[in-house]
Image (cartoon, helix red, strand yellow):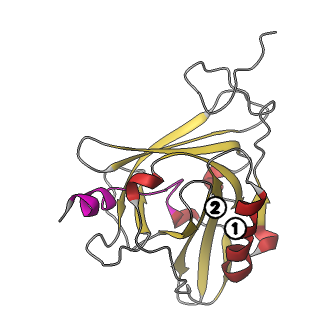
Amino acid sequence: MNSIQLLAAAFVLGLVGLTSGQLVSPGICQNFPVHVNFDVPRYLGLWYEIRRYEQVFQRGGECVTAEYSLNDDGSVRVFNSMLVPPGQVRQSDVGRAVVAFPDESPLEAKLNVTFDATATDISANYWVLGTDYDSYAVVWGCFGVGTTLRAESAWILSRTPTLTPQAEAEVQRYVDLYLSEDDLRPTVQNLDFCCTIDPEVTAYPQCPTQ
């Protein structure tokens, strides 16, 4: 395995595992096309959540971020963080991620993420449908519920707290093709609302002292 494949095998956007997807509907999971020639190093770093399908583990969460960096063993450290108003203390979770099929060529952005060290990876559960690496990412996942239902998850991500008009237009193209507009709830990313009381948090400004 070459160095790019090794990095790829370790990376994920992974806000969370999709076993708690909340958009349940009749039918089987579709095989949507994903981003190919996935450039793992360009995808690492900080992302802000712009919209999502609501999730049990994110219920009421605002000011959501995901940050990715390489672990010493070559896997990717996934650090997710959010506020649940009216609380001011950020809640966070740490996971580990790998690309599901690292030897595929071209490399597809089909990813596995786990937040339980004892868990085993399942079939690709986090798909990057589209990204330009510098401004936006559209992420989707699906798993079967019995034999007649499917549960889907989706996240719209941005490198900044708001999308540029150009990035928004690109995102909307994927939404129109693959996602349910009505089920995407916006995430508050207002910098005054999202201010932090933790001096180690750099994604948002510090809250003014009382």
Looking at the image, residue 122 sits to the left or right of residue 25; the answer is: left
Residue at x 26% of width, y 49% of height: 74
Q: Which residue is mark 2?
A: 155
Q: Quadrant of residue 183?
A: bottom right
Can you say whether 182 is above or below 164 in the image?
below
As rendered, which of 106 and 70 lies closer to the eye?
106
- Residue type at mark 2: give it: Trp
| Closer to the camera in the image, 29 or 118 | 29
Q: Is 152 placed above or below 200 here?
A: below
Please report the residue visible at 62 percent of the width from the left and 33 percent of the height from the top: 203
Give, as a single range, the part of the protein colored magenta. 3-17
Q: Is residue 53 visible?
A: no
Residue beneath label 1, please? 171
Q: Is residue 200 above or below residue 74?
A: above
Q: Nearer the viewer, residue 61 or 180?
A: 180
157 vs 126, left or right, is right
Residue 204: percent from left, percent from top: 67, 31
Is residue 21 shown left or right of residue 38? right
Q: Where does the C terminus fall, quadrant-wise?
A: top right
